[in-house]
Image (spheres, helix red, strand yellow):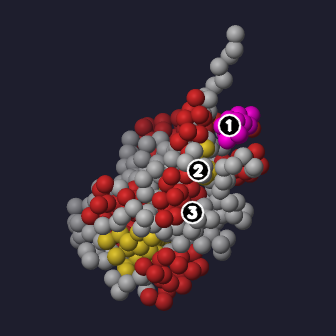
Amino acid sequence: MTTKLADIPLVDLRAQYATIRDDVRAAIDGVLESMELTIGPNVRAFDDEWAAYVGTAYAIGVGSGTDALQLAIRACGVSSGDEVITVSHTFFATVEAIVYANARPILVDVDERTMLMDPAAVAAAITPRTKAIVPVHLYGRTVDMRPLRQIAQDRQITIIEDAAQAHGALLEDGKKAGTAGRVAAYSFYCSKNLGAYGEAGSIVTSDERLADDLRALREHGQSTRYYHPVVGYNARLDEIQAAILRVKLRHLDEWNARRRAIAARYAELLADTGVITPEMPAAGRHVYYAYAIRVPNGRRDALRAHLARRGIGTQIHYPVPIHLQEAATFLGYRKGDLPVTERLSDEVLSMPMYAELADEQIERVTTAVREFMRG
Ligand SMILES: Cc1ncc(COP(=O)(O)O)c(C=O)c1O
């Protein structure tokens, strides 16, 4: 009789929970005993701790990464008629947040090597209506900010970083993702390197006025209770999620270090299999939210099915680029407009990636990839 090997999921939140269960339960219990449920001691403490970790003067906890982007874009004064340049190779929310501000998303191609925003494409897309640039540190790898800062400085364009996938990743100057622009958005969606048990996000900035505006915007635009100088949102972070995030933040660096070690092992074991492994940038610049390999020659979906048969979970980040999404038809893009992005969406496949992934599991994944690619 053969024993069936346990499945290897894309992300295993239960394995992580097992390592922090007592602290998480105590934190949740503390909130329930106090019954302070919205902006209270945990949100205030987490805002301070997260700002200190990122290296900005302020952090404003909100309900999700999408809230974070939406409020950041709005607080920077982006409005109707403005153009905002971002990538099409991203999660839908990046572009959604621009549309919420009634601005026009201008979608540019990515660099084939990094899979991130191509600065030359940004330079070519600038017009007198360009109000902001939203670089996305996709998969946990940071965008080279120097050329983008240059473009932005010359023309007084605001940089709003989408750091939703890059908790703890470093920029080329050694500072953390989220410190390069005027403001940045983080997501703490449950599967992220730092994830809540539900939805949460944060906006980071060192601009005091902007931080005040953002704090007002997250609570219906009120300056003090029931006084509303502007129309805002209900975008509050709740106390239970903040308490959980405070526990998990203490482990983030150690979890990211393990993700890097897993990425290095994947790269070693997948060399010469015919898949393209992601380039490994200088230490610290990648925190491997996703380990996205590329499978050329139209074999991606068959490899994915093969891995599924072996009980190995994978994901495609992302199968349809934003410029070809049905909801983006009004923007007028067509197939062929962003060739690198379109090629990546046909080839990328994210492998299981989480800090608790064991060496033996990494070997099972890579053996299964090798087996398929040989056939
Ligand atoms: C690149 C990117 N931007 C924005 C978001 C939106 O964050 P949330 O899901 O927390 O609203 C995500 C989350 O998945 C993301 O990956």
Most foreground residue, 47 or 84: 84
Q: What is the x, y in percent for residue 310?
A: 62, 29
Is residue 315 within the magenta segment? no
Disc 1, SS = loop
The residue carrying pointer 2 sits among few (fewer than 14), some (14 to 19) or many (20 or more) residues within 10 Å by Cα, namely few
Q: CA distance from mark 2 to mark 1?
A: 14 Å
The residue carrying pointer 1 sits among few (fewer than 14), some (14 to 19) or many (20 or more) residues within 10 Å by Cα, namely few
Q: Magenta region, mostly helix, strand or loop? A: helix
Kindly identify the residue that appears in the image at 47 percent across and 52 percent down: 318
- Which of disc 3 and disc 2 is earlier in sequence? 3
Kindly identify the residue that appears in the image at 55 percent across and 35 percent down: 305
Q: Residue furthest bottom?
A: 154
Most foreground residue, 69 or 366: 366
Kindly identify the residue that appears in the image at 53 percent across and 72 percent down: 118
Q: Which numbered disc, 3 or 1, marks the residue closer to the eye?
A: 1
The residue carrying pointer 3 sits among few (fewer than 14), some (14 to 19) or many (20 or more) residues within 10 Å by Cα, namely many
* Residue carrying label 3: 115
Most foreground residue, 216 or 302: 302
* Image quarter of the N terminus: top right
Which range is magenta?
360-375
Q: What is the x, y in percent for residue 284?
A: 69, 62
Marks 2 and 3: CB-CB under 8 Å?
no
Cβ of mark 3 under 8 A from ligand 1? no
* Residue carrying label 2: 297
Q: What is the x, y in percent for residue 33?
A: 43, 37
Q: CA distance from mark 3 to mark 1?
A: 28 Å
Task: Give amino acid for label 1.
Answer: Gly
* Residue carrying label 1: 375
